[in-house]
Amino acid sequence: MDFRQRFGKLLSDIDFMDVDMRMKMANVFTLFHMEYVEAKHSTFVAWLLDPNADHGMEDLFLKRFLAAALASPPQDANEPLPEVSPIPYQAVQERLLTWDRLDVLSADLRDTNVSTDIRRRSDGGKIDICLWNNSYNLAVYVENNVEPKHTWRLRHGPPRPKREHQSERYLLDLYSQWGADDAGSYDILPIFLSFGNLSPGETRVFRHLNYSWMPLFLRRLLESGTVNQQAQPHIRAFCDWLDLELPSDLAPDLYDRLVNLTNRYGDVLCRLMEHVFQCTGCEEDDILSAFHDVYRRHGATVSYLASFVESTADEHIEAVAKQLRSKLSEQHIEFYQGPASLSASSTKWTSLGGPHNAMEVSLGTRCLSCGVTIYSESLTGKLNRLLASAEKLSNKFGVEIVELTRMRRNFRLVHQTFDTFDQDKMVDAFITCFHFADAVAKSLS
């Protein structure tokens, strides 16, 4: 079945219709684009943890949270202590909370204080979530980390350095402010709460939790009538959002539908999304016109499905990456590999302006596309010169420059699509695009 036929079947597919119905249900987390804003999630989780908040759960969620954390031992808890460390591990371990599940569940934690406005003494940075209970001499710091799916469209910009977790700073501050003898000798507990494939920077003491356990417990509370009526829609929206973000763990039926759609229409969904995102005005083409019509009516669904497709591991990407790394082995090249994509930039291109690269070459084995992306915010006044140089060099490298729009801060300069997966053709196209981008950068240096 060719591309046109599969595109025609997409809208009538029962799996697409089911996902579309889910996506059209109002949800504050997606409506206000809060999906990956850590501060918003910290505020919401702090509200759930606060026994004095107006949700009606009192300390039920707080107890479950602490019990889950205490049941999750640190990754390197049994490793020998380092001889030299900024963290006084021996003193810290003497102050660590040693409760078990029975201790937590039998405690009355209704007078626990919860705040997202506590600052670290060392540098003034905010603690994501701080909890303390004076009756039990208990203090908890939660480092909350939210990472979006690995897709080009969610990144919307050049690759940034790997994020630095602040676990060691949290632990030092937690001990100095609460656990040291002159600080009240509280029992302390550092927790790393994560959404996505993340781990704490400090692994000897930190307890590691993820978001995936929350919906089941919260829905039980909703069914029991514990949650007050005003809070129910917000908690239900949070659980529904987690289902959509973590379908393999939380919504198996939805996950099966997503996999089926990926297998049947993965390249169609990605091609549709890429065209709408990059379009500067279509020629008379019924397929391209249909892309826009479908996106107008089902934009949230198409965006969600395309992100799922790109963030799902593809069997071809490893072989493509290996071949490209062997053919483009210069030291100045930096590769960034995702579940179904590979991109590359050059440390030489940073001379174009700004702290990050202004260009990136990318390839998607599910999207069946390859091209050169421009990040105009990094060009500091050189955009017009770069575009003029690209036009001059396009014939030499046999690439076609995409009609550009200045309305977006990043856009495709070169964009090539493939009807079927062909590793050699995609690798050759990637190499051509890389050499083209390198030549454009050299012409401006």
Image: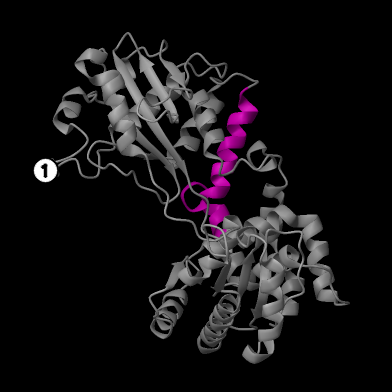
Q: Is residue 9 left or right of residue 61?
A: right
Is residue 126 one of those drawn in magenta?
Answer: no
Magenta span main SS:
helix
Mark 1: few/some/many CA within 10 Å (<14, 14-19, 20+): few
Q: Quadrant of residue 109?
A: top left
Quarter containing the N terminus: bottom right
**Relative image position of residue 133 (x, y in whole percent):** 35, 14
* Residue 112 locus on image (x, y percent): 40, 14
97 vs 395: above or below: above
List the residue tagged with mark 1. Answer: 80
Asked if 84 appears above or below 117 in the picture, the reply is below
Q: Is residue 255 magenta?
A: yes
Query: 151 or 329: nearer the eye?
Result: 329
Can residue 143 be seen here?
yes
Residue that appears at 44% across and 81% down: 324
Q: Which residues are magenta?
A: 231-256
Q: Amino acid at mark 1?
A: Pro
For the question of whether residue 346 can be seen, the reply is: no
Q: Nearer the viewer, residue 332 or 325?
A: 332
Residue displayed at 34% across by 32% down: 170
Left or right, 429 with reference to 30: left
Residue found at x 55% / y 72%: 362
Please give the name of the residue rendered at 45% of the width and 67% of the height, measured from the top-left corner. 337
The quadrant of the image that shows the C terminus is bottom right
Where residue 420 sits, quadrant-wise, is bottom right
